């Protein structure tokens, strides 16, 4: 048996064991509101049947995509400039460090004040949640560029622009991609919370709505399972990118 | 003189790395700078490359004062200087960005062959051995056709067998391309095997203790009496009894 197949079977058996334990625990506690795996599966089927599953997953992904992409487009150049310009870093770093420990969720009231209840608020929160870690990741990646590579490039007579394009950007890509993967994970965490308050669609809304509209805990857990699945898929996608030849050199040897 | 150090001194804060170094290197000459670890040999080379500005004196190459890095003199780092995100071809062609595509292809192919990396054109550095990465680094430097090569302990990270092979390769390339070479090393045997002249530096603050002419034609016989005599002379000069 190849090691790939064995890994896959081991992962599957772990999940299967967890589902069995869940079933047993529910069976042993009569009168609990927590549903077993079967009713959750039926809940997912119900959501798929009435079209809500696709609609909510798409709604959540739509918000994450826009908030996250906007953050990437603005944060990566900002971080690169801060990494190259020590003076900029000294001026802005204290603000970044002060804003970083504030949970993006603390911004919910301000988001609603500025953008009202709707997609824009959620997108703004996701943007905020991804912008800071992305800026810091890009800044650190630039500061970690091997001095030897910068010198080698300078030796060949490159202009600053040319140096940025042919050395700095490819040199920071591996570290930057890891930062982007982590930021996407955070964005996905935040969208769920934002949807519980600021909008009336999406997986976060599904969870809060299922509870409020008659304690449908099967749908609550169905929503959680969907969130986990989509989050896992996003992470797998980003890890695929990390395996490309142009960046693979930057990670520990496998 | 091709390369001239005139009264060069360097301090980092209160630390005097060296005071008043004078040295001339002739066109096409192979000069080794030999000294104990931490004596400032690499600093000399970084100043000659234009990466560092000396606190006193100046370096002239072709009579022109060195103020910044220039592709006419290429610094060869240890193997980690190659760009890991580029293939062998990409690395060798890195400095040829002004050259027309067809000429660039030809130049890359020539140096791939010269350093014996045929068949690895599309490979990334992580797929190469230490010796191959070092040859790639040398090829990248030679491709822009510099007059002067500045090598900073280039073979220090290699195993001893690969190191011997690399020295032979470097001598072959030097004889084929007639570059002026300034080669920093702390390896006494290496300097006697390679150089026309060996410049012996003292510990910090460094000064030139002695310049030794290695008057043995290439290829050098490592068991010839003259080789052993010069080697022992350098061992004594560095202050090591020739015993373990």
Image (cartoon, coloured by chain):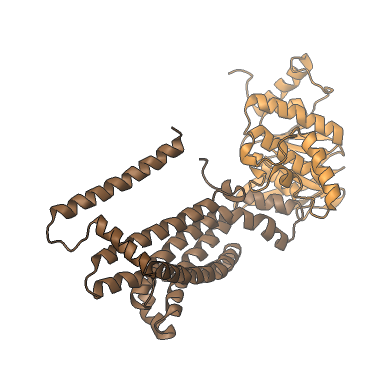
Residue at the farthest front position: A49
Closer-to-camera residue (A71/A12):
A12
Screen quadrant of the N terminus of chain B: top right
Image quadrant of residue B124? top right
Query: Vertically, is B88 above or below B175?
Result: below
At 57% from the left and 47% from the top, the residue drawn is A248
Q: Is residue B88 left or right of residue A234?
A: right
Residue B39 in percent (x, y) is at: 64, 39
Q: Which chain is brown?
A: A
Screen quadrant of the C terminus of chain B: top right
At 82% from the left and 48% from the top, the residue drawn is B104
Asked whether residue B29 appears in the rendered view, the answer is yes
Residue B81 in percent (x, y) is at: 66, 44
Query: Vertically, is B186 above or below A178?
Result: above
Q: In this structure image, what is the colour of chain B?
A: orange
Image quadrant of residue B187? top right
Residue B51 in percent (x, y) is at: 71, 52
Residue A144 in percent (x, y) is at: 56, 54
At 54% from the left and 67% from the top, the residue drawn is A72
Query: Vertically, is A221 above or below A245?
Result: below
Q: Is residue B179 left or right of residue A2?
A: right
Tally of numbered tags: 0
Asked whether residue B212 appears in the rendered view, the answer is no
């Amino acid at each position: 048996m190849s090691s790939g197949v064995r890994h896959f079977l081991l992962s599957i058996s772990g999940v299967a064991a967890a589902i069995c334990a869940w079933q047993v625990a529910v069976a042993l506690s009569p009168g609990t509101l927590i549903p077993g795996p079967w009713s959750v599966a039926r809940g997912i089927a119900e959501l798929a049947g009435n079209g809500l599953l696709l609609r909510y997953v798409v709604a959540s992904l739509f918000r994450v995509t826009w908030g996250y992409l906007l953050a990437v487009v603005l944060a990566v150049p900002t971080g690169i400039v801060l990494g190259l310009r020590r003076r900029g870093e000294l001026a802005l770093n204290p603000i970044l460090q002060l804003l970083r420990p504030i949970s993006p969720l603390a911004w919910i009231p301000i988001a609603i004040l500025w953008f009202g209840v709707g997609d824009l608020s959620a997108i703004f929160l996701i943007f905020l949640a991804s912008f800071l870690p992305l800026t810091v990741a890009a800044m650190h990646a630039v500061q970690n560029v091997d001095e030897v590579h910068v010198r080698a490039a300078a030796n060949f007579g490159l202009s600053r622009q040319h140096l940025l394009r042919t050395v700095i950007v490819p040199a920071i890509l591996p570290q930057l991609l890891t930062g982007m993967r982590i930021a996407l994970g955070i964005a996905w965490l935040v969208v769920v919370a934002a949807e519980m308050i600021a909008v009336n669609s999406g997986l976060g809304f599904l969870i809060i709505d299922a509870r409020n509209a008659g304690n449908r805990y099967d749908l609550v857990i169905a929503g959680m399972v969907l969130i986990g699945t989509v989050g896992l898929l996003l992470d797998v996608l980003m890890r695929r990118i990390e395996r490309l030849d142009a960046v693979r050199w930057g990670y520990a040897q496998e | 003189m091709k390369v001239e150090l005139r009264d060069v001194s360097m301090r980092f804060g209160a630390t005097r790395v060296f005071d008043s170094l004078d040295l001339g290197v002739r066109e096409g000459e192979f000069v080794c700078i030999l000294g104990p670890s931490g004596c400032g040999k690499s600093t000399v080379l970084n100043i000659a490359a234009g990466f560092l500005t000396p606190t006193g004196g100046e370096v002239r190459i072709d009579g022109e004062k060195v103020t910044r890095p220039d592709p006419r003199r290429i610094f060869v780092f240890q193997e980690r200087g190659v760009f890991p995100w580029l293939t062998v071809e990409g690395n060798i062609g890195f400095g040829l960005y002004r050259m027309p595509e067809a000429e660039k292809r030809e130049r890359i192919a020539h140096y791939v062959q010269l350093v014996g990396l045929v068949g690895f054109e599309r490979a990334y550095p992580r797929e190469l051995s230490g010796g191959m990465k070092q040859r790639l680094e040398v090829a990248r430097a030679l491709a822009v056709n510099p007059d002067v090569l500045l090598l900073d302990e280039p073979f220090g990270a290699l195993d001893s067998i690969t190191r011997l092979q690399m020295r032979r390769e470097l001598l072959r390339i030097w004889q084929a391309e007639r570059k002026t070479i300034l080669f920093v090393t702390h390896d006494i045997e290496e300097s006697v095997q390679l150089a026309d002249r060996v410049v012996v530096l003292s510990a910090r603050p460094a000064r030139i203790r002695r310049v030794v002419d290695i008057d043995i034609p290439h290829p050098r016989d490592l068991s010839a009496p003259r080789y052993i005599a010069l080697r022992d002379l350098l061992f004594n000069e560095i202050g090591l009894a020739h015993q373990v």
